[in-house]
Image (tube, coloured by chain):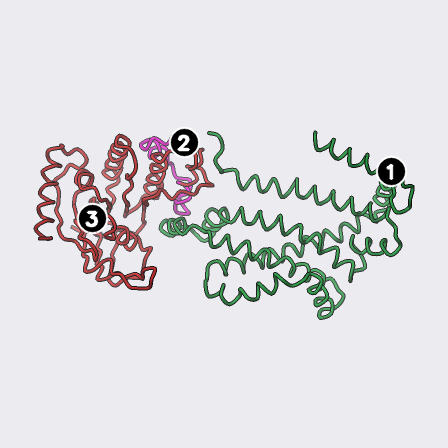
Chain colours: A green, B red
Amino acid sequence: MTRIYSLAILIAGWALAAALVQSRLLPGPLTVGTTILADLRSGELPFQMACTLGRVIISFAIAMILGIAAGYAMGRSKTADRYADPWLTVLLNMPALVTIIFAYIWIGLNETAAILAVAVNKLPNVIVIMREGARALDPELDEMARAFKFTLLTRLRHVTIPQFAPYLAACSRSGLSIVWKIVLVVELIGRPNGVGFVLGSAFSLFDMTQILSYAICFIVLMLVIEGYLVQPLERRANRWRRRPA
Amino acid sequence: MQTAGDAAPLELCIDSKTYLSADGTPVEVVRGLELRLEAGSFGALIGPSGCGKTTILRIAAGLDPDFRGEIRTPGAGRLGIVFQEPRLLPWRTVEQNIRLALPAGDSAADLTELVDILGLGSHLARYPGELSLGLARRTAIARAFAVRPDFLLLDEPFVSLDQAIADRLRDELVALTTRTRVTTLFVTHDLDEAIQLSDRLFLLSDRPTRIIAEKSLPPPRGKRDKDVVASIGDEMRRLVSQVAG
């Protein structure tokens, strides 16, 4: 309930400011709301959001798969860690914009380059977290699984993945927020569609109504994904933690 | 008489087992250890703390292939093991912990009887974090027996339990091993406990460990008088001091 009040106050403040300023550069909530509705009806907004969401999902998946594999290898093998650590440091400190420009110049202004650029930006973050996860794997449980001859699948599902769960949750949450932000930049620079592209062209026209309507829809979408997908998954993974008996 | 396959004795021949300590110097833990345990009998390894009992057990379990020597395990080699710490999966319930160890074709086996003997019936749906140490140990014992092992290893499974609970668990262990006639190797530093439980005693020396005395005890196990236990204990201590002196 408090959340709803707090949001209501924010919107009321916005409406008040817009009413006082009376400028094209600060449209009120009502103007923005009607624009959102119109764009929803015309299908323009869902289309652009779907483009962005698609890129988010694919690059997120690529970064997670590669990052888990690399992080696991580096956490388990000292040799792998020694060799790959300098690369990781380079990747971690590479500005997102540089990666994006490299990708567009070397691969071309296409979808592959866009998705790859986002994935590469998120990758080191996943590796760092999963490496810690792999280092924290309990050798005693591993031994138990070997003694009872658990199959590979059982071991993964019941021994390894539950131990990784908190790390997976951490890097999917922090990673998702990185991906959202970088996807927009990638779209702004070199894609003919998606929320980033729309925001870019609205910016060149100083069209604040459109910028606000897309930004708000985008934030709402993120909150929905966070609240209805990420958090429930996290709760499920933590079910076993000590609860009042 | 040796019948095909399932009545083979346990034979452990460890010529030498060395590991590298943290500062890189090799430490010899076991040297010239030879142990033979008849099929279906209960053997106890007794030795001072830190003499390498757990090392021997890990080698017998096939968890540590890095030694010179030879091991022959009884039967088809289906192993049940109870570690010093219960080593349960905290994110799985008691029942899942027991069932996960079952061989693939056997995962629907009826556990009612085993669970009743160990008094776990009302705890099957709980998570290990909600259990007392005594119950967690019972779960670990149930897991080891559930696989219907040909070969059972127990590593000080009753330490840090209070006396009454340890006594009850010992009785349960005697009942289960008598019923299943599984070849069992039990590690302890408590001579009285070993005398109470076993058919055969193996006394270990300090590092590098070998067997300095062994003795067969007359049946029945588990129901020996205090006086009998005390007199066997004295006899064993004399034997040890002779060897040491």
Element marked by disc 2: helix
User: Disc 2 marks which residue?
Assistant: B123
- Disc 2 to disc 1, C-alpha distance: 58 Å
Verify whether residue B104 appears in magenta. Answer: yes
For badge 1, the amino acid type reads: Leu
For the residues labelled 1 and 3, the Cα–Cα distance comes to 82 Å
**Residue stretch in magenta:** B98-120
Q: Please provide percent x and percent y for residue B196.
A: 18, 37
Q: Give me the C-alpha separation between circle 3 and circle 2.
A: 35 Å
Q: Earlier in the sequence, mark 3 or mark 2?
A: 3
Looking at the image, which residue is at 78% across and 52% down?
A: A195
Percent x, y of residue B39: 21, 48
- Residue at position x 33%, y 64% in the image: B24
Say left or right for A225 vs B169: right
* Relative to A42, A226 lies left or right: left
Q: Quadrant of residue A115?
A: bottom right
Where does the image place residue B195, in percent across and percent down from the top left?
A: 16, 40
Could you say which quadrant of the image residue A17 lies in? top right
Would you call the spot at circle 1 few (<14 residues within 10 Å), some (14-19), or many (20 or more)?
A: few
Q: Which residue is mark 3?
A: B47
Q: Are marks 2 and 1 on the same chain?
A: no
Q: Residue furthest front?
A: A20
**Contact (CB < 8 A) between labels 1 and 3?**
no
Single out the mark in the foreground, 2 or 1. 1
- At mark 1, the secondary structure is helix
**Tag 1 residue:** A30
Query: Horizontally, is B232 left or right of A48 in the view?
Result: left
| A64 left or right, relative to A207 | left
Read off the chain for label 2.
B
Q: Which mark is residue A13?
A: none
